Image (cartoon, helix red, strand yellow):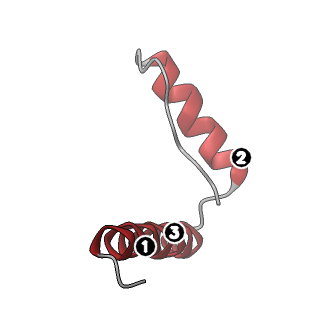
Amino acid sequence: MERSDVMAAFDTQERQEKLRDMLAQWRGYAGLTRASLDTLTRYALACGVKHPQILLY
């Protein structure tokens, strides 16, 4: 991993994974379940959001 472009790509991937983990923890702390996320998705669709992306990892 001596090439700077490879290292930068690796760092970006690692940051994305850490962010996904942190968001999953926050959802857990907030008490969001799959059912509540489905409800939020339905509300977003009703409000005109064409492709809501509310993910539960």
* C-alpha separation, residue under disc 2 versus residue under disc 3: 14 Å
Label 3 residue SS:
helix
Q: Contact (CB < 8 A) between labels 1 and 2?
A: no
Q: Contact (CB < 8 A) between labels 3 and 1?
A: no
Label 1 residue SS:
helix
What quarter of the picture does the N terminus occupy? bottom left
**In which quadrant of the rendered view does residue 56 lie?**
bottom right
Q: Is residue 39 above or below residue 33?
A: above
Report the label total. Answer: 3
Going 47% across and 27% down the picture, which residue do you hit?
44
Going 56% across and 33% down the picture, which residue do you hit?
41
Q: Nearer the viewer, mark 3 or mark 1?
A: 1
Q: Residue furthest left?
A: 4
Q: Earlier in the sequence, mark 2 or mark 3?
A: 3
Q: Is residue 41 left or right of residue 4?
A: right
Label 2 residue SS:
helix
Q: Amino acid at mark 2?
A: Ala
* C-alpha separation, residue under disc 1 versus residue under disc 2: 34 Å
How many other residues sit within 10 Å of disc 1, few (<14), some (14-19) or many (≥20)?
A: few
How many other residues sit within 10 Å of disc 3, few (<14), some (14-19) or many (≥20)?
A: few
Residue holding disc 1: 10
Going 48% across and 72% down the picture, which residue do you hit?
26
Q: Is residue 42 left or right of residue 13?
A: right
Residue holding disc 2: 35
Q: Earlier in the sequence, mark 3 or mark 1?
A: 1
Residue holding disc 3: 30
Q: Residue furthest right?
A: 35
Q: Position of residue 16 (x, y in %)?
A: 43, 66
Q: Position of residue 10 (x, y in %)?
A: 43, 73
Q: Is residue 41 above or below residue 46?
A: below
What quarter of the picture does the C terminus occupy? bottom right
